[in-house]
Image: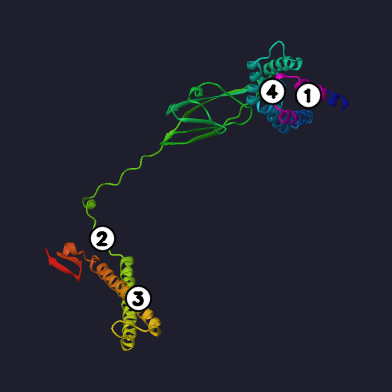
Amino acid sequence: MKLVAICLGLVCAALFAMPAWAEANEADRATARALALEGHDALQKKDYATAADRFGRADALVHAPTLVVDWARALQGLGRFVAAHEKYELVLREGVPDSAPKSWLRALEEARKELDALKPRLGWVTVVLKDPPDASVQIDGVLVPPAAVGVRRAADPGFPEVTVSAPGYESFKQTVTVGPGEEKSLEVSLRKLPEVAAPPATADAAYRPRQKSEARRVAAYVAFGLGGAGVLAGGVTGGLALRKRADLKDECIADSCPSSSKKKLSTYHVYGTTSGIALGVGVAGVGTGLLLLLTEPRADDTESAGFRVRPLVGWGTLGAEGSFQ
């Protein structure tokens, strides 16, 4: 345990000597240092999930090749060979200057060795599209670019799931078993979905007579009910208004009423206004009910019987007229 702690301390000390660490602020450096220590401890315990998380977070705060190499090792332990491969490649692509700390130079050399050992363990999957050639391809839910369809694509050893789909075709899904260093090829021809035939045009497509509707008749009855209630309420409030007017006629002289009649006068106006509104609602309800009933088609189709009904609605007019064809 002492040896491990000493090694971790040396690694951290080397990290802090790097220019990338010098450019970060103090809080980021402290956080990255703690994350790197946790990552190394998890890597020693083969807790690869925790190690990958900690090294990934530390590298996001302060990018360094040493962190990327350890991150790749954790990913490799999780079986994510493709992701680990790309991390090693990243270190090689970015390179390390000759004046860099020894820990950086050592990380570059380790990335090269780890990459050489990892390449033979990658799986490869080739998906060849027969029909349609422009279908969409996904491997484990990740969309494959069109340029990568029909050629070898790196895959983690295991059981990648290939999904192919296209509009108008039945989707294809298959799980492929790929071992380390193994290559699998898959040819896919999607099956076309049956075309839905359009309904044939009929002679009466341009004209469809209205059908009798129970909802229409119910609406007419409701309109009649509201209209009747309105007429009744208007009559009652109108009668009360006339009674109040008769009382006020005895108390008021030449449209001048004493203050004691103020309440009666207010009530008279309320009754009068309410009566007018209620009567208006009543007339509208009765008219609507008549209109719904008079324009309802007959069971024997009035057009074919040669009899046509047309409603008449206007100022002071409510009714219907009929004519034979």
Q: Amino acid at mark 2?
A: Arg
Residue 23 marker: 4
Question: How crowded is the residue under tag 4: few (<14 C-alpha within 10 Å), some, or many (20+)?
Answer: few
Disc 4 from disc 1: Cα separation: 16 Å
Element assignment for label 2: loop
Q: In the displayed structure, does residue 37 sit left or right of residue 196?
A: right
Sooner in the amino-acid sequence: mark 1 or mark 2: 1
Dot 1: few (<14), some (14–19), or many (≥20) neighbours within 10 Å? some
Crowding at dot 2, Cα within 10 Å, few <14 / some 14-19 / many 20+, comes out as few
* Residue at image coords 69%, 21%: 20
Name the amino acid, label 1: Cys
Q: Is the magenta region chiefly helix, strand or loop? A: helix
Q: Cα distance, mark 1 to mark 2? A: 85 Å
Left or right: 125 as drawn, with respect to 270:
right
Q: Nearer the viewer, mark 4 or mark 1?
A: 4
- Among the 4 quarters of the image, the one containing residue 295: bottom left
Give the magenta-colored segment's residue range: 7-30
* Above or below, comparing residue 92 to residue 75 in the picture: above
Q: Are marks 4 and 1 in contact (CB under 8 Å)?
A: no
Which mark, by number, is residue 12? 1
Q: Earlier in the sequence, mark 4 or mark 1?
A: 1
Q: Return the x and y of residue 174 as percentages of the image width and height.
A: 54, 33
Q: Secondary structure at mark 3?
A: helix
